[in-house]
Every structure is written in structure tokens, then in C-alpha cells.
Amino acid sequence: MIFLRERPVPFEFEAMPGYLIRLAHANRTSAHTLVLKLFGHARWPSVKELNVLAEAVHCTEDEISRLSVVREHLGAQGWGWYMAGRHLGKSYFVALRRPVVCPLCLAEGACQRGLWLLSMLSCCPQHQCRLCQTCPACKQVLDPGRSEICHCKCGADLRLAKPVVAEQDELIVAKLLATISGHHFCTDHELPPWVRSLDPDAACRLIWLLGWILPGLRDGVIRSGRHAPNVEEALLIARYALDRLTCWPDAFLLDMQKIEVTVHSTSASYLDRALTSLHRFVVRELADDALDPVRQAYQAGARALWVKWNRIHSLRMFGTQLHLGFETPFDAALRAEDKRCLQ
Ligand SMILES: [Zn+2]
Ligand SMILES: [Zn+2]
């Protein structure tokens, strides 16, 4: 067991990487060395290793569980995150290598907020300013391995970075993500009630679909590789997603129609690939009951598209994969009618 002279207690909602930087700095070592000594490997600790950390810093279970953004093994699904008592099922919902900061939060206390690591958050919901990803002095992207939370590797004080006022769209998405992650913000926008009651994981999946996958398909881009977006991409994602959510489901259905226009100029095989990737995401990642409105809207949009295109082309692959595994009230009514006809 490693001996630590200084044992700071984690702040509420403090990010695990930031806490380790703070702990290492207080003990005049680097976070990398500390992690190696504590856990015997160079990765950030997982939920299962929290007890080792608790013992080393003499913290109670309550105190150590305040830490946010801890790695969690999800069995066959690989790695996810444990975020202030809630789970995030996709590794790309957290941008661990993107250590952004809110200079105004830092001025209030040297703490890396767990919320900042959410990859689809581009601004601070409290101070309503864009998160900084570069140093105000050397203009380099902030180093996740820097030795102090409030200072860049070059020595510049990150609290002196000039805050940029956030746009309304990104602020609404940031407040939504913060509120459903346990923070107290008033979501002052007319989002559908089912969106406001989602858990953070379901909300991230929904925002990813509406703000990242759909706009790509509309522009003829199939985004198969998944990476955590940077601040600029997060801003675009927030804009797109909010647009769809405020006019739900009309804006979503319009997207499906625009995808049809896009594929009209390409080929049936493109439609096949595009809709298969979209379809897989909906079936695999949006299986949560709380996301029922999305699956219903998708099914309505995808069916219209598929029926029309299947008449023109032979969509062999997509045709065999379009087994939705759920049905809309419309399908149920159709089925009842079929039964009546057979009797
Ligand atoms: Zn802030
Ligand atoms: Zn710097």
C-alpha cells in the first residue's frame, strides 16, 4: 500500500481524472505515477478499484462515490462509464482525452467537474460559457496529463481564459444533460416531457442519433466509426438534436424524407447501407422503453422509405434486416384488421 501524506476528499461531482491530478499534485508526484503505484497499471481505475483508492486516501464509501466518470466494465458490451451514480453505456459518450475546462468554474474552485467530460456537452450550464479546450497562452490543446487542474503545462493560469458566451441551443442541451445527471438546473425550454425524463445514457443515445447519425445520412455520409466529438462537433450535435426535439416528431420525419432525396441521387445499395447502419443503431442502442417515441417515429419513417424503394430496387440486404422487433399502434391496428379479414 502506497503512503500518501496529503489526502484530499473528493468534491461532489468531481471527475476521477481531475481528482487523481489533484491528489498527485498534493503529494508532489504525477497522476501517472500515482495510478501505477495504486493500481499496478497505467489506466484510470474502474468502479471495482474504487475501494483501493478509498483505502489509500482514507475516504468513506460515500465520499469516494462522489467521484464522477469512472470506468466500468459492462461485460460483453465492453467498457462504459459510471457517472455520479448513473451509467453511460458507450465509451464515446465520455471524452477522456479532451480535458476541457470552464474558466469560471475553476475560478470558484480547483475541481474538474465530471460533467465537462460528457462528449456532447460544449458549454458550462452554470456560467453559460463555452468550455475551453485550448490554453489561452500557448494555444495548445489542454493536456490530460498536466500536473495542476488550474494550470496548463506551459504554466498559464486557465482561470484567466476569456469566456465565450454559449449559444442558446448548446445551453439547452447542456442544461438537459446536467439536470438528468443529478445537477439542479431549470430546463427552460419546451422539450417533449419524455425527453426530460430520460436517464443520461438514454439521453446521450438519443442526442447521438438525432445530432450525429441522422445529419450525416442526410448529407450522404455513413458514420460507422465512433469517436468522442470535440467541442465544435458537440456544438453542431446540440444544434441538430435540439432542432429535431423541439419539433418532434415532424423534424425527424422530415430528416427521413431528406435521406430519401439524398439516396435518390446515389444508388439503392447506398440506401441499403445507410438504412442498415441507422436501423442497427435504433434496434441495438434505443431498446430502452423510455425511447419508445423514437422507435415509433423511426418505424413510420423507415417503412415509408423502404416500401417505396423496395418497389423500385431489390433491396436484398436491408429487406432481410428490417426486422424491427417492436411495433407501433399503427402496426397493431393493421394486424387486428388482418385477423378480422381472415376470420
Ligand atoms: Zn462554469
Ligand atoms: Zn499553455
Image: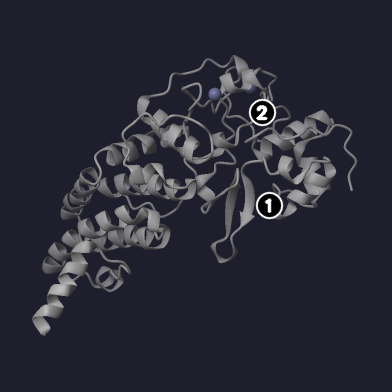
Q: Which mark is residue 47?
A: 1
Taking the image as shown, residue 317 lies to the left or right of residue 91, namely: left
Residue 244, picture quadrant: top left
Secondary structure at badge 1 equals: helix
- Residue at (21%, 56%) from the top-left corner? 301
**Residue closest to the eye, 167 or 184:** 184
Q: Position of residue 86 (x, y in %)?
A: 56, 48
Q: The residue under label 2 is which amino acid type?
A: Cys
Task: Give how far apart the Cα atoms at labels 1 and 2 are.
Answer: 20 Å
- Residue at (63%, 41%) from the top-left corner? 68
- Number of marks in picture: 2
Q: Is residue 228 visible?
A: yes
Q: Residues within 10 Å of mark 1 (few under 14, many from 20)?
A: some
Residue reaching furthest left?
Answer: 341
**Residue closest to the eye, 222 or 108:** 108
Q: Position of residue 281 (x, y in %)?
A: 38, 58
Q: Position of residue 114 (x, y in %)?
A: 59, 37
